[in-house]
Amino acid sequence: MSTPQNTAFVLVPGSFSPTTFYEKITPLLKNRGFEVHPTALQSAGERPSSKGPATFQEDASYIHSTLLQLVEQGKDVVLAMNSYGGFPGTEATKGLSKGEREKEGKEGGVVALVYLASFLAPVGMSLRKSMGEDLPDSIKNAGDYMTLNYEEDWKNIFSDMPEDEARHYMNLMPNHSTVSFSGELTHPGYKYTPVTYLLTEGDKIIPVEAQRQMIEFARGEGVDVKVVETSAGHCPMLSIPEKTVDVLVAAASGS
């Protein structure tokens, strides 16, 4: 069983989202004795034109490097992902699950995947394919970077939060790399590591029906998905931080 002393949490935000979105749960986890690493998406925010927009694979590689550093220290790692973060996060676990590393005689490894209103997708799927016609025209037809409507989108992204707080977090959201949404999953990390899905019934970005379909897909692949149902909106780490932490800690302990 993982203990706080040897357990680290890696927290991956969703598209358009800074690591600030984990600022409520980070201290709560640290207060319980855990090591916490909010990990930025390379695709969130604009880069110099010489680099160009970040790809899905760059996101996955960056998360992989964070995970690798921790597991090489012998840490048991819980990877939590929100929204788009489920795509590169799942991809990033290749070769790093606890079971895979134990077979190689190595200590440490990823011991749990926690999908926070996140994409749990088949190999070959991208976010763009997954959302299909549900993507707004502003995203479907974007150039190098996608933008949000700062006067309107807070109502859906933070639908269960007070307006002043919702607007505060909305104003922290940068543009996001368009090409990242076309990156396709190649590694079904959920087949190698225990999975928890925090389902958000009030979600206006990934409707609860779509979340349930993803859970049933995974179960159809033989994955034992533990589901925790909540009435939260799309960012439970902000609207129900204490509950989210309870879910993460339970995943770490294997319960």
Image: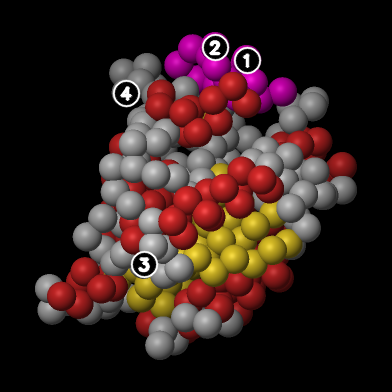
Dots 3, 4 in contact, CB < 8 A: no
Q: Confirm whether residue 80 shows in the render.
A: no
For the point 46% across and 73% down, which residue is it?
35
Q: Secondary structure at mark 4?
A: loop
Q: Secondary structure at mark 1?
A: helix
**Which colour style is shown?**
secondary structure
Q: CA distance from mark 3 to mark 1?
A: 36 Å
- Mark found first going from the N terminus, 2 or 3: 2
- Picture coordinates of residue 106, whole percent (x, y): 17, 76
Question: How far, Cα to Cα, is label 2 from label 3?
Answer: 36 Å
Q: Which residues are magenta?
A: 135-149
Q: Amino acid at mark 2?
A: Asn
User: In the rendered structure, which disc, 3 or 1, sits on the residue that comes first in sequence?
Assistant: 1
Residue wearing tag 4:
51
Estimate the spatial distance between the alpha carbons at disc 2 and disc 1, rounded to whole Å.
Answer: 6 Å
Q: Quadrant of the N terminus?
A: bottom left
At label 3, the amino acid type is Thr
Main secondary structure of the magenta stretch: loop
Tell me which residue sits at (61%, 43%) in the image. 210
Mark 2 vs 1: CB contact within 8 A = yes
Foreground of the two, 232 or 131: 131
Determine the residue positioned at 81% across, 36% down.
Answer: 155
Residue in the foreground of this view, choosing between 13 and 48: 13
